Amino acid sequence: MRDTINRLESTLPKTRQQAMAADFAGETQDAVMLGLPPLDGALGGGFPMAGMTEIRAAESRDWGAACGFAWVLAAMLLKHQPRLGGALVWIAAADARAEGGEPWMPGLSGLAPGPRQILIVHPRRTADALWAAEAAAGTAGIGMTILELRGNPGCFGLTESRRLQFRARQAGRPLLLLRQTGEAEAGAAPARFHIGAAPAGLRRLPDGGRLAGSIGRPAFAVTLEKSRLPAPLSLILEWNRHECRLDIRPCAAGHAAGSGQPADSRPRLSASADGPHRADAMGRVLALPRAS
Amino acid sequence: MRWGVSWRSRGRPEAPPIACSERVGSALRLLAVDEHARSQGVRPGHGVAEARAICPLLDVVPSDLAADQRFLDAVADWADRYTPLVGMDRPDGLFLDISGCAHLFGGERALLDDCLTRLFHLGVDARAAIAGTPGLAWALARHDSGHVVSDMGADDCGDIIPSLPVAALRLPPADVAALTRVGLSRIGDLIGAPRKPLARRFGPLLLVRLDQMTGIEEEPVSPRRPVAALTAERRLTEPVVSREAIEALTGQLADSLRPSLERRGAGARELELQLFRVDGAVVRIRVGAARPLRDPARLRGLFAERLAAVHDEIEAGFGFETVRLCVLVFEPLDAAQADFSGSAEADETLAALADRLTARLGADRVLMPQHHASHVPERASSLAPFVEGGTSGPGPAITHAAARPVRLFRHPEPVTAVAEVPEGPPVTFRWRRSHHRVTRAEGPERIAAEWWIDGEDAPARDYYRVEDDSGRRFWLFREGLYERDVATPRWFMHGLFG
């Protein structure tokens, strides 16, 4: 029996190992350094140019952050690899659009410069969306594909995910899978980000100070859930549009509102505390005779 | 009561005579009767009571004129197999302009026989004739079916026209009755007669009809649908059913269209694939291309996507016997030279992808963003169907400093908000049943409605960019101003920031 098991093991995992080796071979060939050493290291030497990367937001309230991060990532890849500049295909599923709004170009181009041409696809069903993603990923001349899905649809399982990953890796182009309110599930994407909201930085003043109470550079709470690292990696990244790069915000100053010294610090009203004219607690304890 | 379509070729089922009735004025009259009823002496125009007295078993069915017209349309679709120029002659006729088409079917007589035989097997009792003018063909089809008059100048024609009744002139019934009353029952009586008194007495239409029949006056047949610029077709001895076979045939047809397109220096922008089913139904599949196309493989690919999308809706039945590919719109196609960066190639592949997606998903689902000079967020950017060479990029760099959200709700969602002061930003708000406490807010940015579209009473909006205590950034606005508008201002959620 042991022989049988050994024989089975020698045949089966070989194919899987080969497949995994192929997965990583495609990924290491072509990667873009994001300029974030912990993240680049965890991704195995930079963001993979070929293949699928999953970005998910756990709640639909965080959808804006997830979309913003995907777009920012696209802009960074575009800056480092101008050959991606041709066109971007954004496939937006109907339910994701209904729940999270339409991708809006004035806002996106205000956040980061985008590619020359954008094709927005509104598929009727999830199956159509997957088909369109496969077609777009396999077409030469399409720089990047963003596939947007809501939740974890049953028709997008491991097989379909592998298929998309294969197609994107063959074409040597990135495919971003944006998942709205999705659970973490096993997929073929070598890397999966979980994006949450993070307080924005403060606006800079000409004298180098910060303007209190202002909303400055957008920030993202990024967790690399799936990568080569055994443990997830959490960072707060701040987007610098002028230099087109992401900066790591030091964890100690995680709450941006308190970071830095506000230039026009106003005296704050002291929070109301246990003052003398406090209202009495409801009800009083009285020593009533026991009615036995 | 359904007899099926083939009762004419297989024999009439045992049933009482049948007639269709129609309300004329206040009386019910017969509009049409079948042969069985006719043999019993019932005629169209009889009152229903009178007809029942003649033939007590008569089955009278109310007529359905709309269904008759639909049927005529279906027959016209079917007749597209003979010529692209099919004109309607309502309520009960079709004109087929077969100039230059007859030799494809082995001559005029063969075409007529083929047409009548096929219609008979489809269960249609049709009468037809071929002549040099629509007027004469109309007359012969109704009074001497099966006739072929190929040459208008021949003696044959000279014999036929005078012997036809005046009813064959397509005149109103009152005119026919007036002519008959004065003894002019044959067209021969009219041809020789002086024209001026005829026109004075019976009106100009009589002479027009007479000239149209003899060919002195030209009468065009107006085609039912636009005539394709180029057409290639394939008749099959064995009907095809499977999608793969139809695709392969489409590829062959596209291949045979290529020389004609090359000669014109053109490429197809809109194409239609017509599938003629054995039982007479016609399926039309139309695809559009983002740029002029000539390559058979690309054309075949487009139809493959479209067929994959609609194949479940097509009922192949016993198969398609004729497949035709028409170029409806073509445009000049210049061979593009790729520049050094290869961007011409990239454009081409984007157009190819857009075509594939459009063929499968529909034109309203493959879109490109367009920018408009409008302050109102909903109008600043719109989505339009993809066309080659249209502007689609992110557009001009944003000129104003105000930030805009990356996701915009098509319909702003109402929120309940609490503000410290009426004109100030919200302190807390409730959106989709969850509570958000605002830590920072920027604004207001006042965006007034466009009075030339929305009217002068439309309320202005004060937009705030707010961040809640967990760092989510939202775009909220208050519709209406406290000092100016009467109604209480309301708060809405309009977008999510990245």
Image (cartoon, coloured by chain):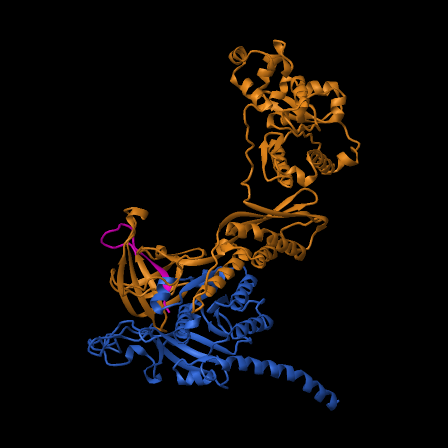
Chain colours: A blue, B orange
Instruction: Locate the N terminus of chain B by quadrant.
Output: top right
Name the residue at 68% across, 87% down: A10
In the figure, B172 relative to B63: above or below? above
Which of these two is toward me, A252 or A24? A24
Q: Which residues are magenta?
A: B479-498
Q: Position of residue A116 (x, y in %)?
A: 40, 65
- Residue at the extreme bottom: A2
Q: Position of residue B326 (x, y in %)?
A: 58, 47
Name the residue at 49% across, 78% down: A191
Which of these two is toward me, A182 or B103? B103
Q: How many marks do you count on the picture?
A: 0
Which of these two is toward me, B37 or A40? A40
* A244 left or right of A292 in image: left
Instruction: Kindly report the secondary structure that dominates the magenta region of the rendered protein.
Output: loop
Quarter of the image holding residue B480?
bottom left
Q: Is residue B481 magenta?
A: yes
Instruction: Locate the C terminus of chain B by quadrant.
Output: bottom left
Name the residue at 49% across, 85% down: A229
- Asked whether residue A18 is in view, the answer is yes
Q: Position of residue B416 (x, y in %)?
A: 35, 60
- Asked whether residue B46 is in view, the answer is no
Q: Is residue B489 magenta?
A: yes
Q: Position of residue B181 (x, y in %)?
A: 62, 10
In the figure, A223 relative to B33: above or below? below
